[in-house]
């Protein structure tokens, strides 16, 4: 199933910043209802928001680079500093990092969006660890399934099923659902970069592994050597 997932998410290479916004009304907004021609004003709550700084945007294949990101997200401190640290690595939860069609910069509310999602993911991880399966959601929202045509007309070529999360939060939820439904090893935190990684049978990592990658292992060795010789990093 993991091989079926296609997901690349934009990240602002200049980073993200938190700012305070007063409550404001946005007009107009057309919402589907009994009288669809009615124009309503929408109140955007005041509080702390996070937005991209407007630098170059890069994309990264999340399911390849961070297959158990839901663990890091659940453990991220629910503070402005914690949110900025996470966003600097992975981007916003629901919005891309480029300017919207109207020229405005995407922004997400910390208290209403980020903190709530973090708390919810920590709750799901706790329930999964206790094997309280009835507490887990039955659906993963914001995920699209696509049946792509064969890449060639060669005999035997078949259509390919691809699953595409629509947002970073949907991708994090899908990762969690994949892990609890078909776990690949147990999870531990890398002693160097602090990312979570699977270990055990089928993962290529022994139970004694301390690092998620060869890069982190080499970095740790380099820092230990420098510490012994008294040199700075």
Image (spheres, rainbow, N blue to C red):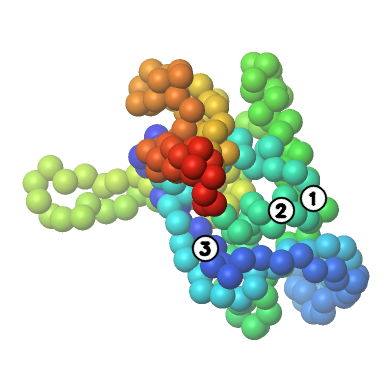
Disc 2 packing (10 Å; few <14; some 14–19; many ≥20): many
Image point (47%, 33%), residue name: 211
- Kindly indicate the quadrant of the structure image that contains residue 27: bottom right
- The quarter of the rendered structure image containing the N terminus is top left
Distance in Å between CA atoms under marks 1 and 2: 6 Å
Tell me the mark number nearer the camera, choosing from 3 and 1: 1
Image point (45%, 18%), residue name: 207
Residue 161's x, y, as percent? Answer: 35, 44
Residue under label 1: 79
Disc 1 packing (10 Å; few <14; some 14–19; many ≥20): few
Residue 230's place in the image compared with 190, above or below, is: below
Left or right, residue 230 beside residue 128: left
Residue under label 2: 83
- Kindly indicate the quadrant of the structure image that contains residue 40: bottom right
Is label 1 in a helix, a strand or a loop?
Answer: loop
Residue 95's place in the image compared with 25, above or below, is: above
Residue under label 3: 10
Q: Earlier in the sequence, mark 2 or mark 3?
A: 3
Disc 3 packing (10 Å; few <14; some 14–19; many ≥20): some
Residue 167's x, y, as percent? Answer: 57, 54
Is label 2 in a helix, a strand or a loop?
Answer: helix
Q: Marks 2 and 1: in contact by CB < 8 Å?
A: yes
């Amino acid at each position: 199933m993991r091989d079926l997932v296609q997901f690349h998410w934009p990240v602002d290479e200049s980073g993200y910043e938190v700012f305070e916004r007063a409550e404001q009304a946005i007009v107009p907004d057309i919402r589907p209802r009994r009288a669809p021609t009615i124009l309503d004003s929408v109140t955007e709550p005041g509080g702390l928001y996070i937005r991209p700084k407007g630098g170059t945007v890069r994309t990264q294949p999340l399911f390849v680079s961070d297959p158990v990101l839901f663990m890091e997200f659940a453990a991220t401190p629910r503070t402005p500093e914690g949110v900025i640290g996470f966003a600097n690595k992975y981007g916003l939860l629901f919005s891309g990092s480029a300017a919207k069609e109207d020229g405005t910069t995407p922004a997400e509310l910390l208290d209403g969006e980020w903190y709530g999602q973090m708390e919810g993911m920590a709750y799901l991880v706790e329930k999964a660890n206790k094997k309280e399966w009835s507490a887990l959601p039955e659906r993963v929202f914001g995920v699209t399934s696509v049946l792509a045509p064969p890449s060639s007309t060669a005999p035997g070529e078949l259509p390919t099923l691809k699953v595409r999360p629509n947002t970073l939060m949907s991708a994090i939820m899908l990762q969690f659902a994949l892990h609890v439904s078909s776990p690949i090893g147990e999870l531990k935190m890398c002693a160097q970069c602090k990312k979570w990684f699977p270990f055990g049978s089928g993962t290529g990592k022994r139970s004694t592994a301390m690092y998620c990658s060869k890069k982190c292992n080499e970095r740790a060795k380099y820092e230990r050597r420098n510490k012994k010789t008294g040199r700075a990093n």
